[in-house]
Amino acid sequence: KKNKIFIIIPFKESLNPKKAGAVSLFVTNSNKYSKFKKDIKIHSSEKLSGIFRNKNYILDFCTKNRDKKIDIIEIHNRPEYVKLVLKYFPKAKIILVYHNNPVTLRGSEKVTDREYLITKCSKIIFVSRWIQNKFFTGFLNSNYIDAEVIYPGIEKTKITKLQKYKNILFVGKLNHAKGYEIF
């Protein structure tokens, strides 16, 4: 069976709109308007049973799908998944999407890790220019050809007229030095 595109969201992310994190919202909203949405399958941990951690989660994906022809695998915020995914799917194009500081994520903490990723991934996407700059910290030569910034957004139809309220939240010990009596 052929599946063209798989998107792997982090283990703890949920596709349930009431529980969704930033990565899930980004993936859901981006794919809603994609011309490839019929070819996309999103892999999440929601339907998994048993005890899972990051390594078991990605291993579960690889073993369940190893017989499928997959053209593109998009990995969100988990550079540590890239080596294992490439082992099982050496012909698939890997797209790595960073939502957080790359130098704090397992699998891209060191410059050598990030150099490996830039050579093995077909594309690396960052949700901000700051994250992209952090990725290339320490590189002698930066290859921006296979890396780009795609900013997250919101649906235009969801924007309504904003009303401002003059609510004040005071947190701290109530004393005159902090000026609470002014409010």
Image (cartoon, rainbow, N blue to C red):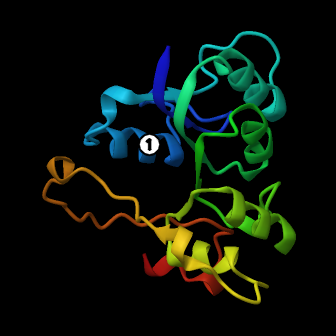
Residue 119, given in percent of the width and then of the height, sits at: 70, 64
Q: Kindly identify which residue carries mark 1.
A: 27
Q: Amino acid at mark 1?
A: Val
Question: Which element type, helix, strand or loop, lies under badge 1?
Answer: helix
Name which residue lies at 30% across and 67% down: 166
Residue 131 sits in quarter: bottom right
Viewer-closest of 181 and 143: 143
Name which residue lies at 42% across and 64% down: 150
Viewer-closest of 29 and 172: 29
Residue 110 visible (yes or no)? no
Measured along the vertical axis of the image, is residue 73 above or below residue 96? above
3 left or right of 69 in image: left
Residue placed furthest toward the top: 49
Measured along the vertical axis of the image, is residue 112 above or below residue 120? below
Residue placed furthest toward the front: 91
Residue 154, given in percent of the width and then of the height, sits at: 30, 54
